Image: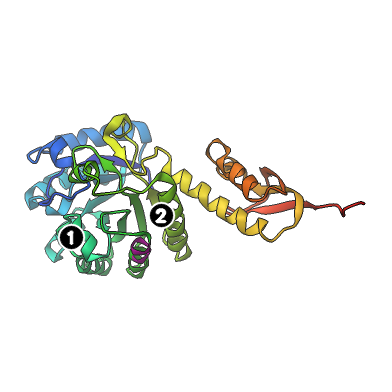
Amino acid sequence: MARNRIIPIFVPHLGCPHQCVFCNQRRIAGVGTSLRPCDVSAAIAAGLQRSGGGAEVAFYGGSFTAIPSSQQEALLGAVQPFLDDGRVSAIRLSTRPDAINGETLERLRRFRVQTVELGSQSTSDAVLALCGRGHTSEDTVQAAGLLRAAEFHVVLQMMTGLPGSSPACDLETARRLIGLKPDGVRIYPTVVVRDTPLFDRYEAGQYRPQTVEEAAILCAKLYRMFTAEGIPVLRMGLQPTETLSRGGAVAGPYHPAFGELVKSRILYENACQLLDRTDGADVTLLVRKDKISAMAGQKRSNLEALRRRYPEKRLKVAAGPCGEWEILLQSVKKPDKIT
């Protein structure tokens, strides 16, 4: 699935009848906050000034297909003139798995929506119940099937480290989402955000979030699983915002470059597999030029970890004729011991 420039339009907690434990949009935006067609037109015009033509309009934030149908049509209708003149290439939106049905799909097709993102979060019904999601894993299966049958692009969103979950449970969620054959996925490690039920549980000592390192190690496994099946991972980690960076994210794996941390972890693991099989003393890790920083790791953390793990080797990183995740080794064997 090709990725276009995105003009995001946030639908502040409209349509969602539930209070998920990790979400604070209801308290921040208020249930009655509305988005007007003129707001959509203005956001698109501003976005086109920055990105040029051919951008994709994306309705994020609320459960779009759960808001009143008249409001859906008004908001989608505001995009139509931009589609007509070619300045916008497509529309995508995010929603809940239990807010998809035949009538909804007919409406989305009429207004030329191409991609629907489903907030699946987990395929464990126990985890979904603990999080107050208000839908089941079967709702995700049914919604994804309806969307694919209607020839929409389908993107599935999952979260790691939710209450009641575990790394094994999250890996099983990934396996089951792969079985639904989505066109892409997003992976969001659970972050404790201020003014949420999860924050209250965290303060009471009833919830332990993942660390950044734990989440990066798990997400590296998930990334490998999805990409091995030809499913692109569109995002890992929450989009950084000023609110989150200035104290809104209280605990858990919030990092403004989390996706890069995961990719750096993948390169580290690939390097370990190679170094385990070489007895060279002087070893240069060759990676694609734009991967040198990721191979070294943030603040050279990968190199330091590799040097601790392989103290007998003298390691360097350099550019080489490599694929995206490929690592080549240049090594010089240890000299024979002279006595």
Q: Quadrant of the N terminus?
A: bottom left
Q: Residue at x 62, y 59 (%)?
A: 273
Could you tell whether 274 is left or right of 178 in the image?
Answer: right
Task: Characterize the local packing of mark 2: few (<14), some (14-19) or many (20 or more) Cα atoms within 10 angstroms.
Answer: many
Which residue is the site of mark 2?
Answer: 233
Dot 2 amino acid type: Val
Q: Is residue 269 magenta?
A: no
Q: Magenta segment range?
A: 168-172
Q: Which residue is mark 1?
A: 129
Judging from the image, what secondary structure is the residue with disc 1 in? helix
Earlier-in-chain disc, 2 versus 1: 1
The vertical placement of 38 against 220, above or below, is above
Tell me if residue 218 can be seen.
Answer: yes
User: Label 1: few (<14), some or many (≥20) within 10 Å?
Assistant: some
Q: What is the spatial separation of the Cα atoms under label 2 and label 1, in whole angstroms?
A: 26 Å
Left or right: residue 84 versus residue 261 is: left
* The quarter of the displayed image where residue 316 is located: top right
Amino acid at pointer 1: Ala
Residue 280 position within the rendered picture, expressed as x and y whole percent measured from the top left: 76, 54
| Residue 49 position in % (x across, y down) | 33, 31
Of residue 86 and residue 91, the one placed in the foreground of this image is 91
Quarter assignment of residue 38:
top left
